[in-house]
Image: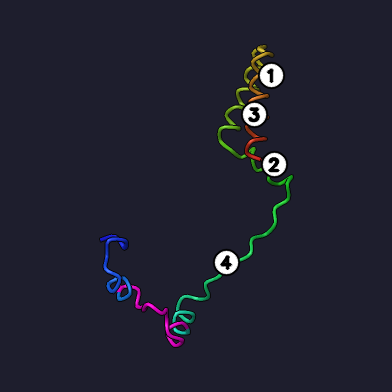
């Protein structure tokens, strides 16, 4: 059964809580068992790193091989067109 379909008393019983919240002893027990309710800070990533991460995308890799194949076979217009598509895709991912 979904939480939103349950009676309020059943929800409190399932969560081992009450309308006014947890008791201080229950808070301390849960902190010891589960840890604090906080998010860890994430490391800052530079813009250059974010830009180059975009090139790990499988679509970009496949398109890059398409550029190489087109250039090797003498289809310069196709190679330029695919290069523009890669650039647009990378810029959208970067932004």
The answer to which of 7 and 31 lies nearer the viewer is 7
- In this view, the residue in front, 49 or 95, is 95
Q: Label 2, on which residue?
A: 51
Q: Residue at x 51, y 76 (%)?
A: 35
Given residues 93 and 3, the one toward you in this image is 3
Q: Which mark is residue 39?
A: 4
Label 3 CA crowd tier, 10 Å (few <14, some 14–19, many 20+): many
Mark 1 and mark 3 residues within 8 Å of each other at the beta carbon: no
Q: Position of residue 14 (x, y in %)?
A: 31, 73
Helix, strand or loop under label 4:
loop
Mark 2 or mark 4, which is nearer to you?
Answer: 4
Element type at mark 1: helix
Mark 2: secondary structure: helix
Q: Label 2: how many residues lie within 10 Å, few (<14), some (14-19) or many (20+)?
A: some
Read off the residue under disc 3.
Answer: 86
Determine the CA span between mark 4 and mark 3. 35 Å
Res 12 → quadrant = bottom left
**In this view, 95 is above or below 42:** above
Counting residues from the start of the chain, the first of labels 2 and 1 encountered is 2
Q: Mark 1 or mark 4, which is nearer to you?
A: 4
Badge count:
4
Residue drawn 73% across the image and 46% down it? 47
The residue wearing badge 1 is: 80
């Amino acid at each position: 059964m979904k939480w939103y379909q349950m009676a309020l008393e059943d929800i409190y019983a399932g969560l081992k809580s009450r309308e006014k919240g947890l008791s201080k002893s229950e808070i301390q027990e849960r902190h010891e068992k589960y840890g604090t309710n906080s998010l860890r800070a994430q490391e800052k990533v530079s813009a250059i790193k974010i830009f180059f991460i975009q090139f790990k995308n499988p679509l970009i890799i496949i398109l890059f091989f398409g550029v190489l194949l087109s250039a090797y076979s003498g289809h310069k217009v196709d190679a330029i067109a695919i290069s523009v598509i890669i650039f647009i895709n990378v810029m959208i991912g970067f932004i």
